[in-house]
Amino acid sequence: MKKRNCFIGQSGGPTTAINASLAGIIAECIDTKQFDHVYGMINGIKGLLEDKYMDLAEMFDNEEAIKELKCSPAMYLGSCRYKLPTYEDDAQTYISLFQTFEKLEITDVYYIGGNDSMDTVAKLSTYAKIIKSPIRFIGIPKTIDNDLMGTDHTPGFGSAAKYVATSMLEVAYDSSIYKLNSVTIVEIMGRNAGWLTAASALARTQYSDAPDLIYLPEVPFIKENFLNDIREVFKKKRSIIIAVSEGIKTENGEFLDSDSKYAKRDAFGHILHSGTGKVLETMVYKEFKCKVRSIELNVLQRCAMHIASQVDLDESFEIGRYAVKTSMAGKTGMMMVFNRINNNPYTIECDYKDVSTIANLEQRIPIEWINKDHNDITQALYDYLYPLIQGEVPLSYKNGIPEYVNINHLKQD
Amino acid sequence: MKKRNCFIGQSGGPTTAINASLAGIIAECIDTKQFDHVYGMINGIKGLLEDKYMDLAEMFDNEEAIKELKCSPAMYLGSCRYKLPTYEDDAQTYISLFQTFEKLEITDVYYIGGNDSMDTVAKLSTYAKIIKSPIRFIGIPKTIDNDLMGTDHTPGFGSAAKYVATSMLEVAYDSSIYKLNSVTIVEIMGRNAGWLTAASALARTQYSDAPDLIYLPEVPFIKENFLNDIREVFKKKRSIIIAVSEGIKTENGEFLDSDSKYAKRDAFGHILHSGTGKVLETMVYKEFKCKVRSIELNVLQRCAMHIASQVDLDESFEIGRYAVKTSMAGKTGMMMVFNRINNNPYTIECDYKDVSTIANLEQRIPIEWINKDHNDITQALYDYLYPLIQGEVPLSYKNGIPEYVNINHLKQD
């Protein structure tokens, strides 16, 4: 029987759940008994171009190892921020990649990532069709931003949302202790989509209202309204907590921190924000002369496995398995997606969509899920979000800290 | 039989474990059956001066309620940042407080807090002796900074240390994924004592070296050495992670961020730092022109109950119980302390010391627990730290977030 080997790669920014998808793909590849080798690209497509890969099937041939991988943060295979050139611009890159695929007798390639990674899947599958290669390319979504089109939500989002909601609750308790007027601004990741900032609303309980105000990038940020909102809340309480997306923009579409000295760009030219909270801190202090503090939740949002969502890890694992089933059924150029069947009881199914119709689009919060004052979310968005943060992951601890998978291979040259 | 009533207060900054001490005091007060009323000051001594207090014994008369309080972050009774004036400067404040104590037939006052709170305990117990009042004043330490003298360590430190170590490990995994030179600077709380920054070393495992370098406020920060240290680490690896205390100082004793626009002061005039990481970020970028990022762990260090240390919560509870036993034995003007009997197996005992010999002193890391290059800790400090972060706290979750105690009483005027 002809050999069947596959490649798995990870790309883009890390999430808490991206290794769960990797674990799901490996587990299904092993279970189908169709593969001789399950290779992992080290540092994504870019690493593969430098011939960096490893054999995964042997390393994860038991349930214990699969479970440890599933419950480890960041990216076991490493990542790259690499925009695959078009075939027209650079044919050699494609030729080189397909030579490697051929040499290793690859039949299936699974690529886990965000929008830029789906762009890679779309380009490679299109090229394969052109050259009549039978290799199948399958995209598995991940992003804490939840901004990929075509899927109810993205793997990794639920865990980030649970971290944000839990941290917001704890910050609210922390802020409750002094009898003085104060404003705490919590800056949350999200370039153009406010899903993660919206998830801070899940921190609300019968004992804690925080966040009192929520500002999302889907609607323009208007300074006067913002200061008025705070003024209104101060009429009712002393300690105000505000959730704000790093990517909020003025009516002219300018990022609030675009003139901040912290504004930076990543390899794709996207602006990396890290000054919005500080900009608002100054704005609030000037107006109210009260205690103001800004907190940037930072990278913990995407790597805090210790407070991951069990629903998210389980779904991320299952969508990995489903990717293998999909390519086994002969599909290519597809991104795996979730369809939500029901909110209560929460039910989803895995499905797939043509990746070329999805890549490079952004799914943002529907305007009807944002309140009229543009400073909070509506019940429909609560209903959408709640199921995604359910369940706690029982980690193994050693010497007081979580036990995560061996990543020493990422340190080699 | 004459009525016996007591007061409990909390003061200073919050920690994850300060409510565990409150729970321990309440539990012991109930168990002794000696008290008619267990009152809680709302917002500490300052709240009491405004006649703000509540009855605690009824509310926490069952194991379930005590356990929920023990596992809730921040401060159930609220806090104040209030420096009690000396008797010579302001006799009226003392007269007013003791009138309240007399009116409520108070025999014992328990005050949970850091250095400034212990100063309050020292002053009140001294005043009581002067006016021949039989009221006993007992201090229960807490601080994530671990900088109180006379005790092996402070309640609250272990949980903060576990949060720092766990987060550092997760940041290390997050930073491992790209194949490029990068420096990640993690700024950790600690004004003059580097205990919490040192605890970041507990993140090290067989798969992760981070932090590669540790800078503590106990030794001078020398820019040339710092840049040389980084240069040396770059010879061995790509992704460098640095743990730095917010309070590091130059050889002249100046805070690194003293000219930063973020430098602020609290009510006691202490400088509140929040710019050290940013200052170093700029310094490193100028020298190495590589990817540099700074992460401020911020208030989550002191309120992240979801990753608290079980050892810390249990000890904080026990030291609360011991405070009641101590005042029942007729002691006053004492701070509760831990004596460490053994590291392996880890054994401590509760004890007490004269608070006036302890208050306003700072316990810093002994120089022999810092390596010769002043960029790491020694084995003795590991041995000291490890026992304090052991054990995970099984929290109750509801709707995906932890269930914490009712704090609605803090919102009233």
Image: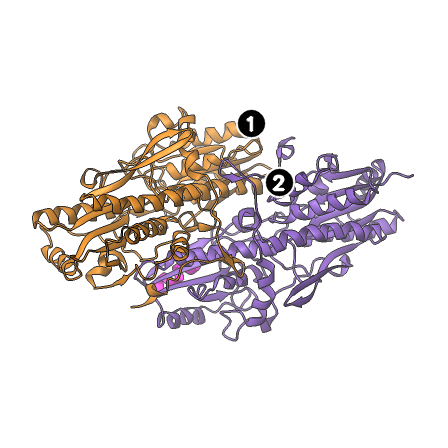
Chain colours: A purple, B orange
Residue A302 visible in the displayed image:
yes
Within 10 Å of disc 1 (Cα), the crowding (few <14, some 14-19, many 20+) is: few
Q: Residue at x 80, y 44 (%)?
A: A94
Q: Nearer the viewer, residue A398 or A186?
A: A398
Q: Residue at x 52, y 53 (%)?
A: A163
Pinpoint the chain carrying mark 2: B
Which residue lies most toward the bottom here? A372
Q: Mark 2 and mark 1: span between their CA atoms?
A: 17 Å
- The quadrant the N terminus of chain A occupies is top right
Residue B85, image x, y percentages: 16, 52
Q: Is residue A364 left or right of residue A245?
A: right
Q: Point out the stretch of residues depicted in magenta.
A: A279-287
Residue A79 visible in the displayed image:
no
Q: Which amino acid lies under the numbered mark 2 shown in the image of this protein?
A: Tyr
Q: Nearer the viewer, residue B321 or B256?
A: B321
Q: Which amino acid lies under the numbered mark 1 shown in the image of this protein?
A: Lys
| Residue highlighted by disc 2 | B178
**Labels 2 and 1: the sequence-earlier one:** 2
SS for tag 2?
loop
